[in-house]
Amino acid sequence: MRISIALPSGRLLKDTKAFLEEVGIKVKEPDSRELISSLDSYTFYFPRVFDVPVYVENGVDLGICGSDIVLERKNEVYVPVDLPFGKCRMSLIVPKGKKISPEKMEGFKIATKYPEITQDFFLEKGIKVKILKLNGAVELAAKVGIADAIVDIVDTGNTLRANDLEEVYKIMDISAVLLVNRITQKTKFDFVNNLITKIRKIK
Ligand code: PRP
């Protein structure tokens, strides 16, 4: 039986490799600019981290990415277990000295890589905002002033400090998660179940 796994390229990859090794899956990174590798009975795919849930929904057996991405992408995947790495938070952030509660942000422009999560957050509070969808370096939008606030990931807080920004509200805690394809969950049930048991023992 072969198992395919979509892995997160970028900052989560190192911890993902180390963690999978702990549960008995040795990862081989692809050569040069290739996006696929194989080792033992595993095939590894290396999409952009934001696309991991799309691969898993559409046929790849397993995936690993941040819980933020699963919530943003809203794909039909099974998320059975949190993983003990990739921990950070998603926060609402404003320029230093401009602290204001989210309830008072009616009409604000909010820049973010996460339009769905941001929309859901403000909808739930009954506050109307305009969302500017960016693809990265979101802090810049607040610094330049094209947005009143941003919704972004905070890990060490270094990026906030370097850009004179401050958090006003923590929207959610984030960690890496395991994604399982809905069909794999049934057809490769023993494998998936075993893997989840091993992961729970490590956590
Ligand atoms: C993420 C996030 C923040 C930064 C937070 O960006 O969007 O910019 O990390 O980390 P810190 O609190 O440890 O400074 P990433 O490096 O993933 O790239 P991006 O700006 O292109 O989204």
Image (cartoon, rainbow, N blue to C red):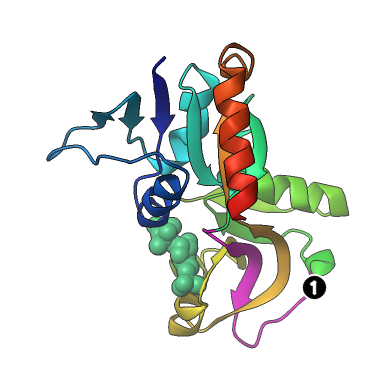
Q: Residue at x 31, y 41 (%)?
A: 27
Residue that badge 1 annotates: 101
Residue 200: image location, x then y, percent: 65, 47
- Tell me if mark 1 has few (under 14), some (14-19) or many (20+) residues whose alpha carbon lies within 10 angstroms of its own: few
Q: Is residue 88 left or right of residue 5?
A: right
Q: Of 5 and 56, which appears nearest the observer?
A: 5
User: In this view, which residue lies farthest toward the bottom?
Assistant: 97
Q: Is residue 49 left or right of residue 110?
A: left
Residue 171: image location, x then y, percent: 72, 61
Residue 90 in magenta stretch: yes
Where's ligand 1: which quadrant? bottom left
Residue 124: image location, x then y, percent: 85, 49
Q: Amino acid at mark 1?
A: Ser
Q: Residue at x 42, y 42 (%)?
A: 49
- Image quadrant where residue 177 sits: top right
Q: Specify the quadrant that holds the N terminus.
A: top left
